[in-house]
Amino acid sequence: MSAHRPGASPTTWRLVIANLSIRYFAVLREQAGHSGETISTAATTPGQLYGELRRKYDFSLPADMVRVAVNQEYRTMDHPLAEGDEVVFIPPVSGG
């Protein structure tokens, strides 16, 4: 996402970084090596964020197999993110 100061030309736009709290479950927790973290990102949606994290941690699951919750409510991968959001990525879970 981009933002700029009022009156600034587009050439002076800067990247806006949001600080987000991320939590992982099941296979994503195993692949990330931890259950959560706080990160700074330019991602504006959970889908963009998951793509960034998938590259970082080499997650095996594609985004269409993962559910997302933002601030304890299930959302779509194109839901807008805001500063301070808690984002939880939930892979498919089988029971027995």
Image (spheres, rainbow, N blue to C red):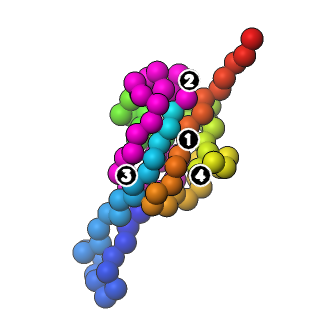
Between disc 4 and disc 3, the foreground one is 4
> Decide: marks 2, 3 in contact (CB < 8 A)?
no
Measure the C-alpha gap from mark 1 to mark 4. 8 Å
Measure the C-alpha gap from mark 4 to mark 3. 17 Å
- Left or right of 14: which side holds 46? right
Measure the C-alpha gap from mark 2 to mark 3. 23 Å
- Quadrant, the N terminus: bottom left
The percent coordinates of residue 12 (x first, y second) are: 24, 75
> Which quarter of the picture shows residue 57?
top left
> Decide: marks 1, 2 in contact (CB < 8 A)?
no
Task: Name which of mark 1 and mark 2 comes first in the sequence.
Answer: 2
Give the magenta part as a residue range. 25-49
Q: Residues within 10 Å of mark 1 (few under 14, many from 20)?
A: many
Between disc 3 and disc 1, the foreground one is 1
- What secondary structure is found at the residue carrying circle 2? helix
Q: Which residue position is annotated with label 4?
A: 71
Which disc, if any, is residue 26? 2
- What secondary structure is found at the residue carrying circle 1? strand
Amino acid tagged 1: Val
The percent coordinates of residue 9 (x first, y second) are: 28, 81
